[in-house]
Image (cartoon, grey):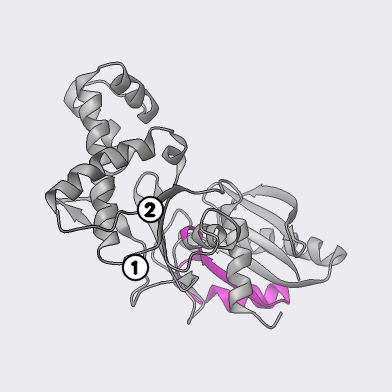
Amino acid sequence: MELAVIDIGGTSIKFARWDGEQLQDRFAEPTPKDLAGFYDCLTEAVAKMKAGHDLKGVAISSPGAVNQATGVIEGASALPYIHNFPIQPELEQRFGLPMAFENDANCAALAEVKSGAAVGKNRVAMLVLGTGVGGALIADGKVEHGAHLLGGEFGFMLQNGRSVSEQATVVHRAEAYAKRTGEEISGEEMFKRAANGDRVAHEEVEGFYESLAQVIFNLQYSYDPELFLLGGGVSRNPELLPGIERHMVNVFKAIEIASQHPVIKICHYAEAANLIGAVANFEQRHPEK
């Protein structure tokens, strides 16, 4: 089954062709500034792929809360013009092909279940660590959207009166460092300084690990996944898992009756995750193809 595959981003839109086994002919275009340009960009790219291949559909990864029932991208993103109207039927008409679309974090999780770090797992929680904490929940191999499309919005959870996005992201921890010291540094620099004995940097980095350990523990004892996946740029830091595990020990000391230790892995896919996950979502939505 050949598909046109699209990953919509705030600065660029990635395209590829799925040949039934892997991604081919990958390229990217700058994200248009308005809806008309957006339609033209996607329609032209799909038309070029259709000209040389027997495409069966279009698989799309998108920002925002994708409502599968209505074909509307709810919520908000860096592309306000794609939200809050029935965009799916409009795109299907322009493509002349059936399509399926899903939120980008959900796509990334589906990619890991399809052929990445979560192969064979039915129940997975993925945390994407960026400027906030997003993610996805997988149940029986499929996305668990929730009653209000809030599945995986871990950053809104509260810890000690503050959001998890404030406490469990390197971006916000670096901002806290700047407030305490008067010096603005990157998250990467903060980790380096922590390793070299900077007390404030050490406190912020350890607070970051502690917050993540508590979030993962809470999810283990509420959603109870088989596996946790960590994604986002900081997931490539080799100190991430040891730091979380170090603080997980303290969590279990606080609740001695708890016995189920979370299994945590780093996501396998990076830049191709959303594209591969979009394919997985299409296969689930259109099994007849």
Give the answer, above or below, for where 130 lies relative to 117.
above
- Tell me which label, 2 or 1, sits earlier in the chain: 1
Residue in front for this viewpoint, 176 or 112: 112
Residue drawn where x is 43% and y is 57% of the image? 77
Q: Quadrant of the N terminus?
A: bottom right
- Let me know if residue 190 appears in the view: yes
Rendering quarter of residue 184: top left
Question: Mark 1: few, some, or many residues within 10 Å (few <14, many ≥20)?
Answer: some
Question: Mark 2: few, some, or many residues within 10 Å (few <14, many ≥20)?
Answer: few
Rendering quarter of residue 257: bottom left
Helix, strand or loop under label 1: loop
Image location (x, y in percent) of residue 49: 79, 62
Q: Disc 2 residue type?
A: Val
| Residue on which the image places disc 1 | 150
Residue 148: say if magenta.
Answer: no
Give the answer, above or below, for where 145 lies relative to 11.
below
Residue in front for this viewpoint, 145 or 21: 21
Q: Disc 1 residue type?
A: Leu
Image location (x, y in percent) of residue 166: 25, 45
Mark in the foreground, 2 or 1: 2
> Extreme top residue here?
196
Residue drawn where x is 28% and y is 58% of the image? 260
User: Which stretch is magenta?
Assistant: 82-105
| Residue on which the image places disc 2 | 263
Instruction: Evaluate if marks 2 and 1 touch, with contact meaning CB atoms under 8 Å apart.
Output: no
Residue 101: say if magenta.
Answer: yes
Residue drawn where x is 36% and y is 62% of the image? 152
Q: Quadrant of the C terminus?
A: bottom right
Rendering quarter of residue 156: bottom left
Residue drawn where x is 77% and y is 62% of the image? 19
